[in-house]
Amino acid sequence: MAEFYLRPLPGAEALRKFIKVSIDLLPKARFQTLTVDTNLLSPHLQILNSVPTDWESRTAGLATVLGERDYCRCTKISASANDQQNNQARFVLEYIVNPDGISAKVVANNLDALSHLGKDPIALADAVYKEFPLIRPDEIFLNALPDAQKKQLQVYERAISDLTAQAAKMQDSAGKIAIEQAEYFRKRSEEMDKELVEKRGQLQQQYDQATQDLRSREAAFSKKVEEFELREGTAVRRDLAKRIREEIAKASDVTISSYPRSQRYIVHIVCLPVLAFLAITIGLGVERTLSKAESVGTYLPLIGITVLFATMLWFYLRFNYIWADRMAQAELTTQKYARDFKRADWLTELICEYSKEGVKEFPPEVAARLAQNLFTEVQWGKQNVHPGDDVLEFLNRVSKFRSTKDGVELELASEGDKKR
């Protein structure tokens, strides 16, 4: 696109010059349209499929109207020509009056289509310049001003020129000042960087020294806390061990409660009268047997009473023995707990003293060996309370029974085989 600026022309003159430019540029080209717009109609005139040489005669009427009537003004003239090689590409030449009314322009669009029509943009510019009084865009508004404003504008231009010169001088001075300031800032920055490096080195040394002192104090404090906790734990442990030893020592003074003793008294109350009664009965039976001879059948009650007496006496003696045995077992267990607690306390102190050095862990094998059989109960073999238990145990051990004419053969299992 090419634009050429000028002042608005009278409508008839603008139309005449536009037609001359078209004839000079493309005299034989067929234009698709020629459109003329006025302030009265848009379009006021439109010619289709024509050549520029025919436009003068066909636009004479409109030119007369535009020349004789001032109220009728031309606002736009447009002509478009098709490219012979490409019908879709059109070369458009326009004369446009701007809405402000003090400026106008000649615009050419699609210059590639113009080259296909046999002309170049230079020929277009020459033709437009030949007919239209072209000016620069800034001259349009300058020449439109009154003389007084033009003189005032000239004064402003001289003032601006002087101001520009002073600004140039100030710019030079500012450049020199900027260079001096940059040099000063560079030197000062180097000095400050050097001072900063020295200060940073001093601060780093102080920080390293303070950090080392803090670590030393933390290590000493941690050691003191560890020692304090160890002493506190040792004191608490020893105090607890002392109280437990006192409790175990008091356990030897514990007596049996009334209920177990009453259960034991029931056995005495029942067994002693029965034994006395059976003994008297046996004595009377023996005396009766010795005083007179009787048949063998009369001895059976005496034999039964004697067996019952022997069984109850065996049960009573066995009961007293087992009671004393269990009491002795409980007393020995209490004594063993007291000794085991002292041994466990000694083992704890040994491990704690060994761990104070912190070289290595106390050997677990040694600790397990030293703690062997701690706090285990004292036990003996199984004790049957009633003689019937012995009979049942004997029968349970019979693994083989065989009766022959020569006698009875029994095979008893051992305790190990019975467990299996």
Image (tube, rainbow, N blue to C red):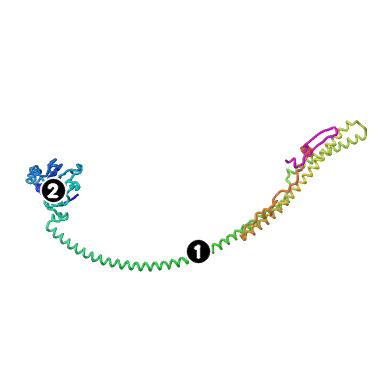
**Percent x, y of residue 92:** 17, 46
Q: Which mark is residue 211?
A: 1
Query: Toward the viewer: 300 or 344?
Result: 344
Query: Toward the viewer: 112 or 105?
Result: 112
Considering only vertical position in the picture, is 54 above or below 153? above
For badge 1, the amino acid type reads Thr
Q: Which residue is mark 2?
A: 25
Q: Mark 2, residues whose alpha carbon is within 10 Å: few (<14), some, or many (≥20)?
A: many
Queried whether the magenta region covers residue 236, the answer comes back as no
- Check disc 1 and report its element: helix, strand or loop: helix
Residue at 73% across, 45% down: 257
**In this rendering, does residue 404 appear at all?**
yes
**Percent x, y of residue 408:** 83, 35
Check whether the beta carbons of the residues at disc 1 and disc 2 lie within 8 A of each other: no
**Percent x, y of residue 105:** 15, 50
Query: Toward the viewer: 417 or 247?
Result: 417
**Magenta stretch in the rendered image:** 397-420
